Image: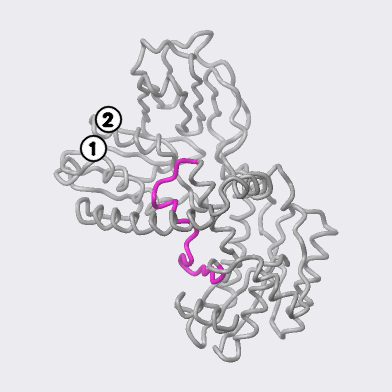
Amino acid sequence: MTAEEHFLNDLVRLDIGKGCSVLIGLSGGGDSVALLELVHRVAEQHQLTVHAARVVHGIRGDDVENAEIELCSELCEERGIPFSSLNDGTDGISAVKHRLGTGTEQAARFIRHSALERHLKELGADFILLGHTAEDQLETILMRVFTGSGPEGLRGIPESRSRLRRPLLSWHRSELRRLLRAAGVPWAEDSTNSDSAYRRNRIRNELIPLISEIVPGWPGGLETLGERSGEVADVLDNHRKKVLPMKKCDSEVSWLIENWDEADDYTRAAAIWNGLSEIDVSDIPDRRVPWRTIKDMRRSVSMGQTWTGRGFTLKRTDQRIILAVIEQTFGKFGDEGRIVLDAEDLIKGFTATLGGYRIVIQPDAIDIASAPVEILFGGKLRTPEIRGSSITEKSSGRFIPDAGSEISYIYGKEVIEGPDDE
C-alpha cells in the first residue's frame, strides 16, 4: 500500500469524504508539514478544498516565529494552498494561563485550537486537521498512567472530536520524516522540544529512552493498554447510560434518586464525570477533574450534603441528584459552598477551589483527631482551628478572573499553576 492509499483510508475512516473542505493546523514542524504534503497528494483525487494556518502565540522569539511563518507560507504557495498566519486574539500565553489557571502547554494548546476554530468558521470549512502521531499518542497515555487516569483517559488522544480530526495517529514520526526526505520537503525543528521546563519534553527526551532500554517492547504494550482501555471505557459508558440515564437542561444535568441509590459507586463517579463534561463552560480544553474531587463529590451527595467547587454545585433533592454550573459574578458564588474533609484528606493533603478562594491544606496542618473537618464559604471563609493561625497567607494573584475576593492559602505554600496538559 502506498503512503497516499494509506492516508486516503485514514481520511475515509474519519468521515472526511470527497468534496470536503479542510483547514490544516500547520506549525512548520515535521509532523504538520508531512500532513500538508499528504493532503496535497490526495487533494485532487479526493476532491478536497484545502487551507492551512499557523497560530502565533509568542512562546518563541520573533526571529524564530517569522522564519517558521515564512517556511509555512512558501510550502503552501508551492502547492497552491491558501495560507494564513493567525494571531491568538488574546494578550498572550501569560494572560490565558492567568485566566484559565493552566500551565504553559495547555494555555498554548487552548490558543491554537481557539484560533483555528475561529478561522474554520470564517472559511466555512468542514474540518480542522492536526498532525499528532503515534508517538504523541504513546506519550499521552504514559503521562496519564502517571496521573492516575481511568480507562476513559488511558484510551489516549481521540482521532476525532467535534470538527477536529487527527489522521496521523497511526503514523510514526520516522516514516513521516522518510516521506519528507524522499520528496525533498524541508521542515523546521521546534527549539522548545528540547526545553526540559515542559513535562512532556522530559518524558520524551529523558524517560522514554530509559524505558526503551529496560523494556524494549513497551510501545506495543502501551498501544494494547490504550486499545483495551478504550473498549473498557465504552462498556462502562454503556452501563452508565443504562443504569443512570441523565437528563440535561441548560446548564445543569440530573439523575433520578432511585437510580442513583441503586447504582454502584463507580457508576456514580462516571455519571458525575460525564455530567461535568456536558455542562463545563470554562473554555479549558479537556479539563479533567481529579479523581479525589470526584470521590468527594460522590461522598458528599450520598451523605445528603451539597458539594460546591470548581465552578459547579452537586446537591440532592427529594427526587433528583442535580449537578449545575454556578452562576458567578466577579468570581463569587451566590450560595454557601461546603467541602468536607475526612482523615484521609488530612493525612495526604487537600487542594480545592471555592469561589475565588484557592484552598490548600498540607499534611500535619490539622490534628487528625479533629476529622471530619468542614470548610464553609458564604461571603467569607470559615475554617476549623489550624495550628499557627487559621489563614497564614493571602495572595493578590488570581486563579480565576476575580474582582470580588482573594485566593487564600491555608497553612501552605502558593499553588503556582495547574499541571501542563498535552
Whether 154 is among the magenta residues is yes
Amino acid at pointer 2: Gln
138 to 309, vertically: above or below? below
Q: Which is nearer the eye, 202 or 313?
A: 202
**Which residue has dot 2 on it?**
305
Start and end of the magenta stretch? 147-168
User: Which residue is under mark 1?
Assistant: 316
Tell me the SS state at disc 1: strand
Nearer to us in this view, 236 or 413: 236
**Colour convention:** one colour
Residue 83 in the image: x percent, y percent?
A: 71, 76
**Could you tell me which secondary element the residue under label 2 belongs to?**
loop
> Circles 2 and 1: CB distance less than 8 Å?
yes
Q: Earlier in the sequence, mark 2 or mark 1?
A: 2
* x, y percent for residue 169: 54, 66
Residue at 52% across, 69% down: 165
393 in relation to 10, above or below? above
Q: Nearer the viewer, residue 389 or 157?
A: 157
